[in-house]
Image: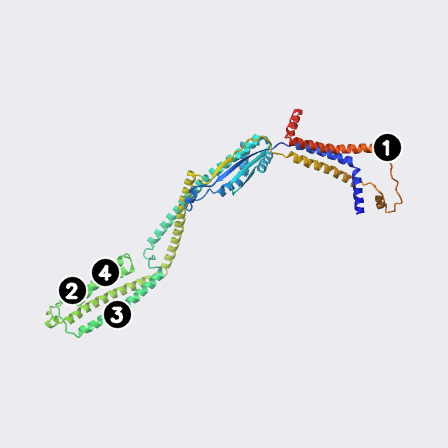
Amino acid sequence: MQDQLQTTRTFLRMAWLYRWAGLSAAVLSCALGWTVVLLIPDQYEVSAKLYLDSRSMLRPLLRGIAFDSSTLEDTAALLGRTLLTRPNLEEVARRTDLDLGTHSPEDFDRLITGLAQSIKVSGTTRDNIYEISFRHPVPRTAKAVVDELLNRFMESALGDTRQETASTRKFLDTQIASYEQRLASAEERLKDFKQRNLGVMPGAQGGYFERLETARSQWHEAQLQLQEATRSRDQLHQQLGGSPATSTSPGSAEDPELAALDLRIADLHKRIDDLLLNFTDRHPDVIGMRKLLDDFGAKRSALVAAIAKRPPTAVASPVSAADPYRAQLQVEAIQAGAQVAALEARVAAHASRVSELEKKVGTVPEVEAELARLNRDYDVNKKQYDELLLRREQALMSQEAEQSQEDVKVKIIDPPRLPLLPVGPNRLLLASVVLVLGLGLGGGLCVGLSQLNPRVIDVPDVREMTGLPVLGAISLTAGPQHRQQRRYELLAFGAGLFGIVLVYAAQVTLFLLDINLHGRLQHVLGALT
């Protein structure tokens, strides 16, 4: 502990040897610093407060019907981001004549950078109140900048949304016209394709393989029905063969074979009429049945001619006419024959249809695949076209809602005012900082010089320097004249320090009394120059 105290004492005594250099440095630095502080231009601050009002009846009413393009968050983001963009700041500088003080692109660039740093935008989304503030040495310039920023923001908030909506509508109209052309082209291709492949187009019954399987199933079912009807007809003929025959005249209209042909022809006409309700004349079933109808017509004509050439016979015997059982069998046999003929026509039609479908096994799937591709293209274009129409209507309704009542209103609750008193710089704080730095610089200079040029101060320094034992020391005895000179030096040094503190105290007093030292110094410098 004793060694540390001795070291500190030696350190301070060595620094004390350079006290005048330190005092001079402190006086010069404080004087220079306080002069700079007084020469710093006054800063006048102008601010304006905005209130973003999002209370609107249209927003809940139009939810889900129109686009909500003007939300409170979007307007706040516009205030925070787009207001301080470089193009916007350049326009503000030109409109407020700040660019007149620049003489080169570098000066103008520094001006814009300074504007971006000086303009402050603050606020909270809780109360929706935002503040724009700006500081400048000239009060009117500061107010002009804030006014211009407010104008720019109002123009952006009220005009950009409408301009964006108009651009959106223009884009949607262009896209709708484009998709309308695509849709018309797709419809034309689909129509031409259906006309070229009219007989092989898939219908309501499904695709090609489904229709082929259905045709085969119907063909086999008709064959089974034909076998059943043929057996029933043969049994009826066997029963008639064991009964007394009934003779008829050769030209009688009651001829069983002719009656069976007439029933077949009538049934074919009925079936063709039923098919034409769902299909065209080119359908395979219709074509097959008409061929059978032509064949049956030729057979009937030949049978009528043969009956006309037969010799007349006796009318039915009394026994035959009086036999109702045989007459009933004859009627059933005629009906059975007609049913067999109809089933034969159906089997032939189904066979023809199956054969025709099997011939198209390599063509119809390609047609169906091409049709599916065309339908897919058409559906995609149609879906996009309908979606674009819906979006355009929503955009139109949104624009009309914005024109009738703004969704987010911007209200200026505290307009900018011309400031009378400066808000900066804080010269009291700067003067205090200059005092501390000046005294610190003086003390630091003393310490630095003492370390660069060390002196022997006490006996321990000699012992430490030489490494030899010190046997004794001779003290210096100051005379009256030396003590008087020493006293004057101490008074002068104290007066120097006191003068620094006194000048600082005078500045603090003048600042507290609101005496504008800066203005008076500027006036003096202006008179001198």
Residue furthest to the bottom in view is 242
Q: Which residue is mark 4?
A: 270
In the rendered structure, the answer to whether residue 199 lies left or right of residue 98 reads: left
Earlier sequence position, callout 2 versus callout 1: 2
Q: Which residue is mark 3?
A: 228
Q: Nearer the viewer, mark 3 or mark 2?
A: 3
Q: Which mark is residue 429?
A: none
Q: CA distance from mark 2 to mark 4?
A: 26 Å
| Residue under pointer 1 | 480
- The kind of residue on which mark 3 rests is Glu
| Residue linked to disc 2 | 305
Crowdedness near tag 2: few (<14), some (14–19) or many (≥20) residues, C-alpha within 10 Å: few
Residue 331 visible to an observer of this rendering: yes
Q: Residue at horizontal 80%, vertical 46%?
A: 2
Q: Residue at x 73, y 35 (%)?
A: 26
Relative to 317, residue 198 above or below = above
Residue furthest top in the image: 527
Q: Earlier in the sequence, mark 1 or mark 4?
A: 4
Neighbor class of circle 1 (other Cα within 10 Å; few <14, some 14-19, many 20+) is: few
Mark closest to the chain's N terminus, 3 or 1: 3
Image coordinates of residue 74 in percent, x first then y, are: 49, 42
First of labels 2, 4 by sequence position = 4
How many angstroms separate mark 3 from mark 2 (CA)?
A: 32 Å
Image check: 476 left or right of 194? Answer: right
The x, y position of residue 63, in whole percent, is: 42, 45
Residue 363 visible in the current orientation: no
Determine the secondary structure under disc 4.
helix
Q: Residue 346: horizontal and vertical position, in percent?
A: 26, 64
Q: Which quarter shows the C terminus?
A: top right
